[in-house]
């Protein structure tokens, strides 16, 4: 598999180098077409949201290529650490249209095309800007989940070429980024749960920016330029029904069974393990919030549920310090109440609520076990 990826990357780089040399200052013919390509959703993590690219087709000059702003190199040193930190370098690369469409046909993902209705001089400007980016350091950019990705980069280069902020978001500007993202995880329960609890306050802002491929597709259909539509009606190049995966473990039922087991077991060891897992996740969220440049991970109020201070409760419990174990249990019950009230109008309330209930049961049990009983004097 690594050899296949390497050969494919090498081929794209060779195509890129030859295309840059060929296309510099090349005038497009009047038959040239420039389109925005929107690719359907996949079942791999990187493909949950689809993809955006730009196609330039000019039969007179024998050009039919796709500019892809979503490329990254798995062989980057410390790839995972860089991705988590938020300083992984993405880059734009060019593919032949045939190779591009064959890849999505192989992955059984739909592909849609919207041809831009712009004058010849602006087509040339856009084409030149794309090629200038390819041959400069601007080819690389630091990926940001909402602010800078394959879709936002396409929006930026088109708006720059039109010399106006023509493409803006149409629709769904009155709901949050979190609400917009939530349905994309259908069929991937633990991915939905994980993103629900690791994202902080940024994704609770109103989703006023175009950051997802189908947001751009829908906005293009409603955008006008020079008193006419900016893009022709969308054409379907490939059509596949997205298959929702099924899994015996990656579903809500295993989640509820595990939490029900914790509640019904009424076992001190299991309670401690549950609280330890919550606390370690809280430590991770706090560390990532400080370490990462991803703004989406900062200011994570979910630490009220996944509190690092639960570690202190566990230590006091192990030391059999009933007074402070009780106090920290009550403190975290207060955190839980505040968290529930804060979460009640958020998109992820119902997916997290069973964990809130389980945590409440466990903390109440811990508090009752360690509450000092007042002797009755007769």
Image (cartoon, grey):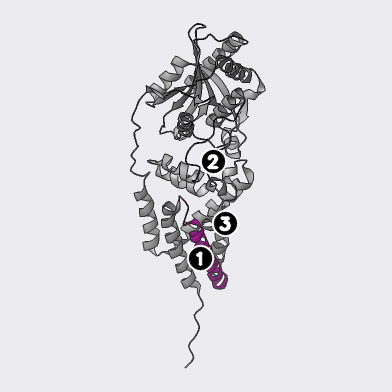
Query: Is 322 inside the magenta-drawn segment?
Result: yes
Q: What is the distance, in whole Å, between disc 1 and disc 3 at their CAs? A: 14 Å
Query: Which of label 2 and label 1 is nearer to you?
Result: 2
* Relative height, residue 3 to residue 339 (above, below): above
Q: What is the distance, in whole Å, between disc 2 and disc 1 at their CAs? A: 36 Å
**What's drawn in magenta, residue-wise?**
319-346
Could you say which is closer to the camera, residue 166 or residue 186?
166
Residue furthest out toward the right: 137
Which label sits on residue 308? 3
Mark 2: which secondary structure? loop
Identify residue for label 1.
333
Identify residue for label 2.
208
Residue at x-position 41% and y-position 57%: 354
Q: Residues within 10 Å of mark 1 (few under 14, many from 20)?
A: many
Residue at x-position 48% and y-position 8%: 59
Q: Are marks 1 and 3 in contact (CB under 8 Å)?
A: no
Mark 3: which secondary structure? loop
Residue at x-position 49% and y-position 61%: 341
Residue 128, given in percent of the width and then of the height, sits at 61, 16
């Amino acid at each position: 598999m690594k050899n296949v990826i390497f050969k494919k990357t090498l081929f794209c780089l060779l195509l890129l180098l030859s295309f840059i040399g060929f296309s510099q200052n090349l005038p497009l013919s009047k038959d040239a077409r420039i389109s925005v390509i929107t690719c359907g959703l996949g079942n791999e993590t990187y493909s949950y949201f689809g993809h955006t690219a730009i196609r330039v087709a000019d039969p007179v000059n024998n050009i039919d290529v796709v500019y892809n702003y979503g490329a990254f190199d798995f062989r980057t040193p410390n790839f995972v650490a860089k991705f988590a930190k938020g300083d992984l370098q993405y880059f734009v690369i060019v593919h032949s249209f045939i190779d591009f469409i064959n890849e999505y046909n192989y992955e059984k993902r739909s592909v849609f095309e919207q041809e831009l209705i712009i004058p010849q001089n602006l087509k040339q400007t856009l084409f030149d800007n794309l090629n200038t980016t390819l041959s400069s350091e601007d080819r690389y950019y630091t990926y940001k989940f909402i602010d800078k990705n394959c879709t936002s980069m396409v929006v930026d280069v088109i708006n720059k070429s039109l010399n106006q902020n023509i493409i803006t978001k149409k629709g769904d500007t009155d709901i949050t980024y979190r609400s917009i993202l939530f349905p994309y995880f259908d069929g991937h329960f633990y991915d939905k749960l994980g993103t629900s609890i690791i994202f902080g306050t940024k994704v609770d802002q109103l989703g006023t920016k175009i950051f997802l491929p189908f947001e751009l597709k829908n906005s293009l259909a409603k955008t006008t330029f020079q008193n006419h539509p900016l893009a022709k009606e969308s054409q379907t190049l490939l059509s596949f029904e997205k298959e929702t995966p099924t899994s015996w473990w990656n579903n809500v039922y295993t989640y509820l069974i595990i939490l029900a087991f914790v509640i019904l077991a009424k076992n001190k060891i299991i309670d401690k393990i549950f609280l330890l897992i919550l606390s370690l996740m809280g430590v991770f969220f706090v560390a990532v919030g400080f370490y990462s440049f991803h703004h989406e991970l900062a200011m994570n109020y979910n630490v009220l549920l996944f509190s690092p201070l639960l570690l202190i409760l566990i230590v006091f419990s192990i030391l059999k310090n009933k007074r402070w174990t009780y106090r920290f249990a009550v403190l975290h019950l207060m955190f839980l109440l505040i968290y529930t009230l804060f979460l009640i109008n958020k998109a992820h309330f119902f997916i997290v609520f069973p964990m809130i209930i389980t945590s409440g049961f466990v903390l109440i049990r811990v508090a009752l076990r360690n509450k000092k009983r007042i002797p009755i004097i007769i």
